[in-house]
Amino acid sequence: MAVVAGCAGTQRGCAASCAESYGADWVIVQMGDDGVAYRCWTLTDASVSNEERSDGIYWLSPDGHLVHISGHYNRVQVSGGRWDSAFLEVGLTRDMCTEIQTQHLPPRSR
């Protein structure tokens, strides 16, 4: 059993390291205090990194903007082009993410 867990941990670590260094496909969602998504990004072949001493992450947008976000976000590294299942990991669909992107909703809190 330990060997299997070790391999799984190694696979996870390698995927994370390769994604940060070489890029990957991502679904990133930012939510308000009420848990409702108000920002959604679909990134293709992007390197997403953790900010040091912060709960934030950052990446370079296709337009060349350095995007930093922190607080109330989830991200999923898309594996094998399976975008639909990646969206489901954060409780969304591709259409929902597109709608959030076009609305530019402000964050809400209760």
Image: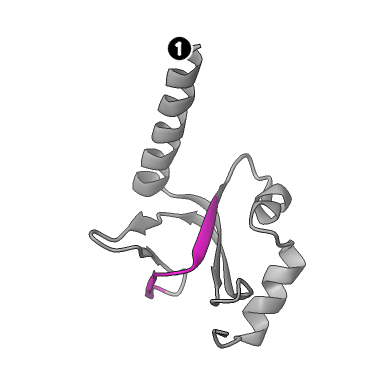
Q: What is the residue that sits farthest to the left in this orientation? A: 53
* Residues rendered magenta in the picture: 64-76
Q: Residue furthest front?
A: 110
- Disc 1 on helix, strand or loop? helix
Q: Position of residue 13 (x, y in %)?
A: 39, 34
Instruction: Determine whether 57 is above or below 2 in the image.
Output: below
Say left or right for 41 vs 89: left
Q: Is residue 15 magenta?
A: no
- Corner quadrant of residue 67: bottom left
Is residue 75 covered in magenta?
A: yes
The amino acid sitting under disc 1 is Val
* Residue drawn where x is 45% and y is 13% of the image: 2
Find disc 1 in the rendering and name its residue: 3
Left/right placement of residue 73 relative to residue 68 reads: right
> Which scheme is used to colour this image of the protein?
one colour
Residue 100 percent coordinates (x, y): 66, 77
Helix, strand or loop: magenta stretch: strand
- Counting from the top left corner in percent of width and height, residue 71 is at 42, 69
Of 22 and 32, the residue lying toward us = 32
The residue positioned 42% from the left and 19% from the top of the image is 6
Instruction: Name which residue lies at 38% across and 75% down.
Output: 65
Q: Residues within 10 Å of mark 1 (few under 14, many from 20)?
A: few
Specify the quadrant of the image occupied by residue 92: bottom right
Quarter of the picture holding the C terminus:
bottom right
Above or below, 15 relative to 62: above
Side (left or right) of 29 relative to 51: right
Relative to 69, residue 47 above or below = above
Q: Which x, y percent locates residue 45?
A: 49, 53
Residue 105, by quadrant, is bottom right
Determine the residue positioned at 38% across, 45% down.
22
